[in-house]
Amino acid sequence: MSKEIPSCKRFTGYKPCYSDHNCWLEGCKENIPVGKKILIINLDAMGDVLMTTAQLPAIKRKFPESTIYWITLKVAAPLLYHNQFIDFVLEYNFESISVLQEIEFDYVMNVDKSQRSCALLNSVNAKNKLGFGLNDDGKIIPVNDGAYYNYLLGMDDHLKFKVNQRTGQDYLAETFDLDYQRDEYVFNFTDDEQKFIEDYKKSIGISNKDRIIGFNTGCSELYPNKKMTIEQHIYLIEKLLATGKYRIMLLGGPEDTERNRIISEHFNGKIINTPTTEGVRKGACYESIPQVIVTGDSFGMHLAIALKKYVIAWFGVSCWTEIDLYDRGIKLYQPDLFCSPCWKKVCPYDLECIKMIDLDRIITEIENYFNNSSMK
């Protein structure tokens, strides 16, 4: 007997959505329309993945009836869990790719200018392709008119480093033919995670009246020169502790474990050294506790933006103009330093951009924030 397969988001063809109902024979019980099928490809840095979530509200404004798939690396996938706009989060592997290649999408949107992401865009069956793909020579190319400015930023250092004043969210919206309304990042905790946060605060003696400063001390190993020195962190923390007004938390990932241990031991129990090896969602739980996050341009910065924290961020090798703090923070950089930004992995000038960070300005900005906040 031939039956029409339900076109409903919940129907899988593997098992019933409800144990007492056969959708195939009896018709769909909920019938949530699939609508436009949209695939987002974003395999690059975790901070970029968080920043790309700011495109989701615009996608839903343009395609209110739609099903959104997102493929990313295993390490970044948890950042997309419990996101109300995303229907399917897939890890980049053979199994996911083989499934995606059997789906006919209405749109595929590739964020990344990398060969693997561009090859995936080429291989997916989609009526409309936006962002970046590969040509017959394996070269990365823009595949729609809206992607040209984004593409030129990667090809023209003068445009990217000196001329451009647009944020990454702005020109990515143009890349995907979306209206740009300065939408925020989208990141949600579960009820269990909220409980974990409150239990952790109690276990370390933190109350809602405490003024807490989080130091995201490191950065990814891809661009190791984005971070301040251990000595700079110690200077800042000593000055802040001397006021008697603040609690200090060290934050970071596995690559920051050793430097956080050194900083923590210097203060002999006077600061809180949070775990660094429990995964990105637990890391987000810890980072949700401080009111202020001090960080370089790193995943920790993007997570702080997603958590709507007040962010004090410094920039050296990377482009400060591309980052939107959503009026919750300040950006420290050296506009007159001829070599910054540069995006170099090895510095030929003895890391002047890091040595020149105004540490006392950071302290002043922290004081200003708390003096002007509702915690006075």
Image (spheres, rainbow, N blue to C red):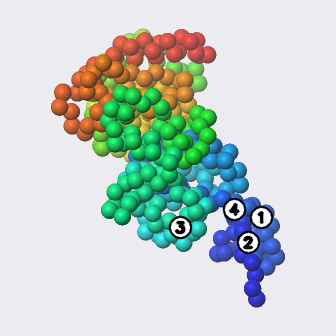
**Residue at image location 45% in from the left, 63% down from the top:** 122
- The three-letter amino acid code for the residue at tag 4 is Val
Comes first in the chain, label 4 or label 3: 4
Real-space Cα separation, disc 1 to disc 3, in angstroms:
25 Å
SS for callout 4: loop
**Residue at image location 58% in from the left, 20% down from the top:** 209
Q: Residues within 10 Å of mark 2 (few under 14, many from 20)?
A: some
* Residue 38 or residue 143, whichever sits in front: 143
* Residue 285 or residue 98, whichever sits in front: 98
Real-space Cα separation, disc 1 to disc 2, in angstroms:
8 Å
SS for callout 1: loop
Q: From the viewer's perspective, is the residue at label 1 or at label 4 nearer?
A: 4
Farthest residue toward the bottom?
1
Q: Is residue 234 above or below residue 30?
A: above
Residue 287 circle label? none
Real-space Cα separation, disc 3 to disc 2, in angstroms:
21 Å
**Res 90 seen here:** yes
Indicate the position of residue 139 as horizontal and vertical percent values: 34, 57
Indicate the position of residue 3 as horizontal and vertical percent values: 76, 81
SS for callout 3: loop
Residue where numbered disc 3 is placed: 125
Residue 6 circle label? 2
Residue 34 circle label? 4
Indicate the position of residue 306 as horizontal and vertical percent values: 53, 36
Please tell me in which quadrant of the rendered image residue 36 appears.
bottom right
Comes first in the chain, label 3 or label 2: 2
Residue 31 circle label? 1
Real-space Cα separation, disc 1 to disc 4, in angstroms:
9 Å
